[in-house]
Image (tube, rainbow, N blue to C red):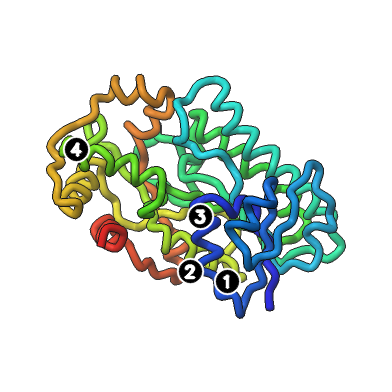
Amino acid sequence: MKRIIINGATGLIGKALIDYLDKTEYSLTVLSRSTEKAKNIFPDCEVVKYTEPLLPEVFENYFAVINLAGASIGAKRWNKDFKKLLYSSRINATKNIAYAISRTKRKPEVFINASAAGYYGYKDKSPADESSQPGKDFLARLCVDWEDCIKEIENSGIRSIKLRTAMVLARNGEALERLAMPYKFFVGGKLGSGNQPFTFIHIIDMVRIIKFALENTSVDGAINCTAPEMITNAEFSKILGRILKRPAIFAVPAFMLKLIIGEFAETILNGRYIIPKKLQDNGFKFEFPDAESALKEIYG
């Protein structure tokens, strides 16, 4: 049985991943700052206390280490303090883990680290694959620094994966709940002009990608975790409205979005098409390659 230790397991992706992985194939350990909370959520998993610094012994004899930790990008309005939290919750934890893993005697075979599709920025309007250059906005620079934290692990010879993840669609997911909320009051519709690219991934495909990366030794480096469909925000909004049986005729003006969520609005109002080239080249098959199939599964 292969042993896996997961940091950030109490988040949306972490919970879904632990639920998805076959317990007869994998033995799962949760690394958490709050061990009591983790034990309540995952009574069948071993729970290990996250400390600073982490000792190398924490990661001995594991097949894989998965780091999904980081404050939610859209949890609050972006201001100076919240941007610091977004940065520190990712950089500090990843550096701490990387330092410990690189000093283990029996190193894991694979390390998987969260990142975001925001790596590519939105100034360049051409579709981005894994070979595209990073952007220069705050989110892009955050992703670059985040990914740089694992160089020590890469240099130690461990196969390393960086998950450049788009918006994750899940029924209990914060992002989709916020998008769907206006439709419940019959005022749903596009954001801004609606012409901006809308990138997404269904939660089931997201955890399938992680399992695919765990099991395929030919996969390493950055992976774009996005559905292959290229769709605009306006097109997505119409599909969402149709499936929820609500009109999608309204629009949230750009200035209002900027007032509500601050600088993060620039990312939402612009966006960029992202191609999951590496997954496609390695034979990964999406269960939900388009918004229609993804939203139908979520809302039944």
User: What is the distance, in whole Å, between disc 1 and disc 3 at their CAs?
Assistant: 20 Å
The front one of 228 and 265 is 265
Type of amino acid under label 3: Ile
Q: Are marks 2 and 1 in contact (CB under 8 Å)?
A: yes
Measured along the vertical axis of the image, is residue 272 above or below residue 114?
above
Q: Secondary structure at mark 3?
A: helix
Q: Secondary structure at mark 1?
A: loop
* Front position among marks 1 and 3: 3
Q: How many marks?
A: 4
Mark carried by residue 282: 2
Q: Quadrant of residue 64?
A: bottom right
Mark 3 and mark 4 lie on one chain; the one further toward the N terminus is 3
Type of amino acid under label 2: Asn
Where does the image place residue 208, in percent across and percent down from the top left? 47, 66
Where does the image place residue 174, in percent across and percent down from the top left? 41, 44
Q: Secondary structure at mark 4?
A: loop
Q: Tell me the residue that label 4 is attached to.
A: 185
Type of amino acid under label 4: Phe
Q: Tell me the residue that label 1 is attached to.
A: 216
Q: Is residue 155 left or right of residue 138?
A: right
User: What is the distance, in whole Å, between disc 2 and disc 1 at their CAs?
Assistant: 9 Å
Q: Tell me the residue that label 3 is attached to.
A: 13
